[in-house]
Image (tube, helix red, strand yellow):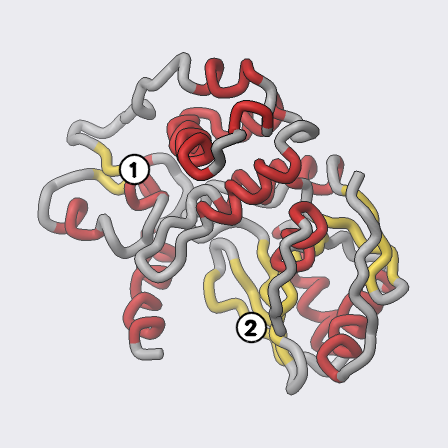
Amino acid sequence: MIESGSFTAGNAHEAACATALRVLHERGIQFLVGGTFAFTQYTGVVRPTKDLDLFVAHGDLERTLRALGDAGFETSVPFPHWLAKARNAELAMDLIFSSGNGVARVDADWFRFAAEVPLYGIPVKVSPIEELIWSKSFVMERERFDGSDVLHLIRARGHVIDWPRLIARYGDYRLVLAAHLLLLRFAYSDADRLMPGWVLEQVLADLSPPPSAADTPTCYGTLLSRQQFLADVAQLGYADARLERGHMTPETLEVWTAAIEDDDDH
């Protein structure tokens, strides 16, 4: 169980956070707090942020956007396969219902295993550490790498993580978890005491690549970066795992890829 948050509503930004959380709570909408707040709760590592990340089920997205719109937030759905946004002058919120690669969809287990803490006097649920690790472990963009977050989460909570459940989350993509566990051993000299001894052995027991149904080889690198493996698909003849495995549609993939240029311009 994680400890109660230490954040207090003392400025316009925090007041806006409290308003958003209270509106969703009063409307009976299920949501989970993630982002910096959840990371700090689990690791004790404090870092500043002016954003608020909330995880919601896709089926609740429309209700969530309506509730926040009624509270004065501007809302949008820039990426229909995983992300909506809400903002006002004091707060920017990401409303996350999957992941950029389409793998880590928010499902019932996110809520089933969430811990409840008070935040700004409002009872909220915090994303389970297993789902935080799972979703963050695929983020390996040129401009953003969440691997250090994964290692900090394991370092702080490896002794209480539900490892069988986390390993099961990866399914055919267990090599991604294996890569992070090997980096953990490199990053921390005391890695052997940070998690049960059987975990690494079990994860490394099967290093088979994910199966491919395509006639041509499949590039799974597109699940790690939306940009860095595009040449493999466009020029080298690989099938895109995001499409082959049904994580995204051609339409959502087009929107997600087109946004790379917008991000590069900022």
Percent of width and height locating residue 84: 56, 65
The crowding category of the residue bearing disc 1, from other C-alpha atoms within 10 Å (few below 14, some 14 to 19, many at least 20), is many
Camera-nearest residue between 139 and 149: 149
Residue at the limit of the structure toward the bottom, as seen here: 89
Q: In the image, which disc is placed on residue 76?
A: 2
Camera-nearest residue between 116 and 24: 116
Q: Amino acid at mark 1?
A: Tyr
Disc 2 to disc 1, C-alpha distance: 30 Å
Task: Say whether residue 65 is left or right of residue 70.
Answer: left
Q: Earlier in the sequence, mark 2 or mark 1?
A: 2
- Give the quarter of the image for residue 26: bottom right
User: Where 206 sits versus 175, above or below?
Assistant: above
Percent of width and height locating residue 122: 87, 61
* Residue 19 seen: yes
Camera-nearest residue between 73 and 66: 73
Question: At x 59% / y 25%, what residue is drawn?
Answer: 193
Q: Secondary structure at mark 1?
A: helix
Question: At x 31% / y 61%, what residue is drawn?
Answer: 257
User: Where 106 sits versus 204, above or below?
Assistant: below
Q: Amino acid at mark 2?
A: Ser
Task: Say whether residue 37 is left or right of residue 195.
Answer: right
Per the image, the residue denoted by label 1 is 220
